[in-house]
Image: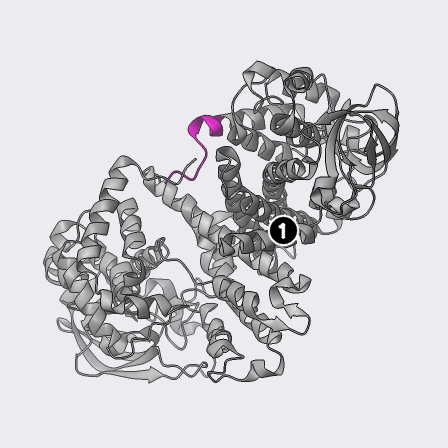
Amino acid sequence: MNFDFSDDQKQLRDQARKFLAEKCSPKAVRIVLDGKAPYAKELWKGLAEMGFLGVAIPEEFGGAGAGHLELCVIAEEMGRANAPVPFSSTVYLAAEALLIAGSEAQKKKWLPAIASGEAIGTLALFEGKGNPAPKNVKLTAANGALNGVKKPVADGAIADFAVVAARTGSSGREADISLFLVDLKAGGVEVKSLTNLDPTRGQAEISFKDCKADPLGAAGEGWSILTQVLDRAAVLCAFEQVGGSDRALEMGRDYALDRIAFGRQIGSFQAVKHMLADMYVSATLARSNSYYGAWALSTNAAELPEAAAAARISATQAFQHCAKNNIQVHGGMGFTWEFDCHMYYRRANAMALGLGSLSYWEDQLIDRMRKKNAA
Amino acid sequence: MNFDDTPQEAAFRETARKWIDANAPKEFEEELSKSSLGRIRLAKHDMVEVGKAWQKKKAEGNWACLHWPREYGGRGATPIEKVIWQQEEGVYGKLTQPFQIGEGMCGPTVMAFGSEEHKRRYLPKLASGEEIWCQLFSEPAGGSDVAGLRTRAEKQGDNWIINGQKIWTSGAHYSDYGLLITRTDPNVPKHKGLTMFFLDMKSKGVEVRPIKQANGMQEFNEVYFTDVVIPDGQRLGAVGEGWSVSLTTLMNERMSIGARLATGVPEMFEFCSNLMLEDGLAIDDPAVRSKLASWAVKSNGLKFTSYRTISALSKGERPGPENSIGKLVSGTMLQDIATYAMDLQGAAGLLTGNDEETVQGQFQQMLLSSPGMRIAGGTDEILRNIIAERVLGLPGDIRVDKDVPYNKIPTKGR
């Protein structure tokens, strides 16, 4: 059994960590947090130069042609550094949708641009409240033109193109949904920035008005493609969440060692020690579940739907748990804008919703486990 | 990343599988498969006798304590081969329960601190199940604080005279030998005045009494020592070094990686899949699904954490600390699952008989047994301390009795 990343993959992780420690310090994250830039442009360029943006994109489309395991280790570091760049929307959602369903021409147009950092992509799925479900897709597509409003769209205000879920039928079934590619710079859209929990990753509302769109995948196949994209993104996001959990745990541990109260390190009090031990437990469970997700993703295993949901739930819970208790360990200082704790708290809670809520994924997991048990 | 054996591992697995297929006591397979949550019941046979027969057969085939050196009854197998053996042994591994303390704790301690003569005399018989060992550490006054123990050993010529009481001793009533930690010097701080011995459990003055537990069962014992004589030759380690000897024993306890802890999740999933509530199946209820999903990912998380540990062993690396979370997670989970399963049963949930509504009372049993899971082998609180101190590097607790002579430490009633 070799249920671990290879030495090369671990080396890539170290390389990514070193790069991000240098180019993505908390100070750099704060430039975006404080609204002084929509995202860290220089960092984005650097990630392209390092080959990180196209790590899982085949060489023929301008990528490094490595695989999803390599992307997982980079994702972990992106989460650890709280990187304020549109990585998840561009790389996990848009690029994966193209890889699964894109035509040769579509891949040729967008994938090299993603790998080189020239194009930011996103997925426009949600329309206000509600989880991923065919019935929640109201935006229509007729004669190659989209009409409707999507929100929230991750990184929508800085995206160059979007994969859009649209209604092309009214049978009440999954086959009513089709996907489209939209060049957001080509007109027919109105983009509005929305404030959100985590200002280091923007959210937007995009209104489509007779907007020209290019079908992505076959008509009526939209929901099935979307499900695959969300499963892949669930695993990749789980690695970001694992990285964030570990960082929040480390911050809490370091502070508990450093801070003296009642004449001793606060980390010598069992109330604090046990809180940190529990954070370690959550983070460890999340890491192990995410490894299983990584295995399923990288081998395109039949277990992927179940593994992805489990990784998603475990990592969401761990990041929320670690981020919230990191603030608690820090006490009053943890509740200041000046300390970095809230950046992880914001990221953890925003990520918990971005691909659909925790309860949505719990629901998915049970369905998928039952399907497996019945088979 | 893969779940495959190396060619060498695959060959080993094949050899083990063939041997088990030819030799396992298949007549017990069904009963063993059905015993869940660590409880083994054989309707018509004594579990210890059946276990001894299986262990003996394994020893004859060189499969008992296979990670031990050959000269002491083992096979000289690597850690990963031991894990593969356990995977293949499967349900029959449940029969090894009476020998686990000997194999996991007493044997390694004798191996580290016993004389060559001791090792050749005792270890092969321990390995083959011919002689069963128990561990005599916990006391009424020394549970989590093991070093606070009171059982005295006083030197008399070439012998030691033992007086005191141990508690929570599994298998003492069928054990032949015991590993015993005692206080030999009450005038020095508590960790410094301890000495380790082994003794014949049939020695004069040893009295074993079963403990009736809170769940109504009897799985542990109290052991009383009244002027029990132990020859100095049965001392393990130097006088006053008992604490560091015991750390070897306890470290081995935590190395038991292959053992999959019961979580209650498969039982709960099946229960919810069949239970009809007012509005339909329990598993279709959003509240039930949410809880079930959270438990399932914890249980999976433990499984895949052990896979990470096994992978490290397979590469010949030392496993990381991640496996230390197992009991902490599963103990509480069992308790929570039992409570919730009974909640779903409504008022009938309070019944503990073998009613159909309560699924043969399995969750009621789980509820009553689960407090013990959170205490035995390190309480939840001690386990959190261990994770905090050894994994996260946080400071140890401030110990007010650390430098105080043992006989000056305040206790209740002294």
In the rendered structure, the residue with mark 1 lies on which chain?
A: A
- Residue A183 position within the rendered picture, expressed as x and y whole percent measured from the top left: 79, 21
The stretch of residues the image draws in magenta is: A1-11
Q: In the picture provided, is A31 more to the left or to the right than B23? A: right
Q: Residue B193: image x %, image y %?
A: 32, 66
* Closest to the observer, A25 or B41: B41
Q: Is residue B372 magenta?
A: no
Under mark 1, the amino acid is Gln
Give left or right: position of B178 versus A225: left
| Residue at 48%, 66% in the rendered image | B267
Give the x, y percent position of residue A184: 81, 23
Residue at the image point whose x is 52% and y is 27% from the top: A67
Residue located at (67% from left, 47% from top)? A323
Q: Is residue B52 above or below residue B127?
A: below
Whether A191 is drawn above or below A1: the answer is above
Q: Which quarter of the figure is the N terminus of chain B placed in?
A: top left
Asked whether A10 falls inside the magenta stretch, the response is: yes
Q: Secondary structure at mark 1?
A: helix
Within 10 Å of disc 1 (Cα), the crowding (few <14, some 14-19, many 20+) is some
Is residue A199 visible in the rendered image? The answer is: no
Q: Residue B323, how many percent across, how many down?
A: 43, 51
- Residue at label 1? A364
Query: The C terminus of chain B appears in which quarter of the rendering?
Result: bottom left
- Residue B128 lies, with reference to residue B39, above or below; the image says above
Q: Relative to residue A164, is residue B292 drawn left or right?
A: left
Residue at 73% across, 34% down: A178
Q: Name the image quarter holding residue B372.
A: bottom left
Between A28 and A314, the one lying in front of the other is A314
